[in-house]
Image (cartoon, helix red, strand yellow):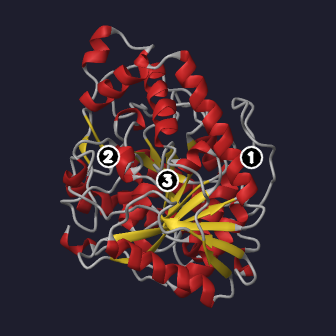
Amino acid sequence: MNDDICLKSASELLELYRGKALSPVEVTRACLDRILAVDGKLNAFCLVDEESALASARKSENRWQKGQPAGLVDGVPTAVKDLILTKGWPTLRGSKTVDRDQAWNDDAPCVARLREHGAVLIGKTTTPEFGWKGVTDSPLTGITRNPWNPCMTPGGSSGGSASAVATGMAALAIGTDGGGSIRIPCGFTGLFGIKPTFGRVPAWPSSPFGTVSHVGPMTRTVTDSALMLSAISGPDFRDWYALPGEHRDYRIGLETGVGGLRIAYSRNLGYASVDGGISTLVDQGVKVFEDLGAHVEEVDPGFPDPCDCFTKTWYAGAANLARTLTGEQHERLDPGLKEIIQQGESFSLDEYMQSQEERGALGLHMKKFHQDFDLLLTPCLPISAFPAGKEVPDQMADGRWSSWTPFTFPFNLTGQPAASIPCGLTPEGLPAGLQIVGDKYAEALVLQAGFAFESVRPAPLPDVSGL
């Protein structure tokens, strides 16, 4: 068990609360102090509500003293990405176009579930404007940085949530993932994060980028993601895409292991270029699954690069977003977002509909693939973190963020569950992530595989003493 209160897992905290060895007020105070100590260098939070957090913690402490916790995450300090509505707090989405001075009377479904389960909400985490890219900087909140090396990006678009959890500013965080935005920052900061099957965690309002955008947990351990997913999944009448409720505790069965599972390993999906150091770390990680008794076969899933399909889907979503903006608001947007809006507006209806046919074919292809394989393993990212403030590394200067995320966005198009789990550090001391992809609706199996891996390959956390 970690001696640093801020770095204890949510599961550890709950046991300590239950045994009255630690209180939610102590933990919340410690997390708030950690924010004061390190967030000036990282910029993970765009809003911190100390008064509200401590009030929630005191209520939680009272419940625990009576032996009557409200739910699964009672008293656990939790951060919410600033794309997600949170009652009483402005949700500015990293944009100067959103009016702060309006009524903020609604919780998004995942926030409502967290409140019902007793979570202590600490604040809102930074995002690029409207979550449009795979790094975290915005005209409103500036540049968010990686706790392993503050000169580097934590990735995005849930980069604020990643930096917050990796450093103990929060135990749990909500992320969103429209092209990798949970998995990218988890890969760059050494966390576990899962994009559940589309609809498993209800979303409202719906993303302007459409049905590629998922909501999910970002945590330091697999068990904590299973815990958090148990709390936030289930239907909400406001999301007509939401899946029927399973009323499931995803922690049950985590220890089943991977013995006998049929696992495919693709080094590059048949078309991606991967840094040699990352490949080595991922190869070593895949070997762990073999050692644990899985039947691993190196095989590509066999689909062509779907970047054009994703681009048309994503950029059309950006154009959809722009429909609601005035000319003056449009001028205040991130220049890169303005560029993809313009491209999205240039697509014809025929082009867009063709891309959606391609998306459907990709989904069917992966359904057939999973008739033979329970899971697919890939690198999460082909590179390690690059300098903060850039959309792309220098060697890809002519591309957009999708040029360095070839492993993540395909599984937003298909709606499958996919997770990133840390699998080692590069010689430069930066994390690498291994991606675990499951068949649709198979979150439990992805979590089970992640738990088996983590049990023999626990990941280090960044040293916050120098921040």
Counting the numbered discs, the total is 3
Q: Classify mark 1: helix, strand or loop.
A: loop
Q: Position of residue 368 (x, y in %)?
A: 75, 55
Q: Residue at 54% x, 79% y: name it.
A: 286
Sequence-first disc among 3 and 2: 2
Label 1, label 3: how many angstroms apart (C-alpha)? 24 Å
Q: Amino acid at mark 2?
A: Thr
Q: Amino acid at mark 1?
A: Gly
Image marks 2 and 1: residues in contact by CB distance under 8 Å? no
Where, by quadrant of the figure, is residue 318 drawn?
A: top left
Residue highlighted by disc 1: 234
Q: Residue at 42% x, 31% y: name it.
A: 90
Residue highlighted by disc 2: 136
Residue 426 located left or right of residue 66: left
Residue highlighted by disc 3: 408
Residue 410 located left or right of residue 237: left
Where, by quadrant of the figure, is residue 142 drawn?
A: top left
Q: Quadrant of the C terminus?
A: bottom left
Where, by quadrant of the figure, is residue 20 drawn?
A: bottom right
Label 3, label 2: how many angstroms apart (C-alpha)? 17 Å
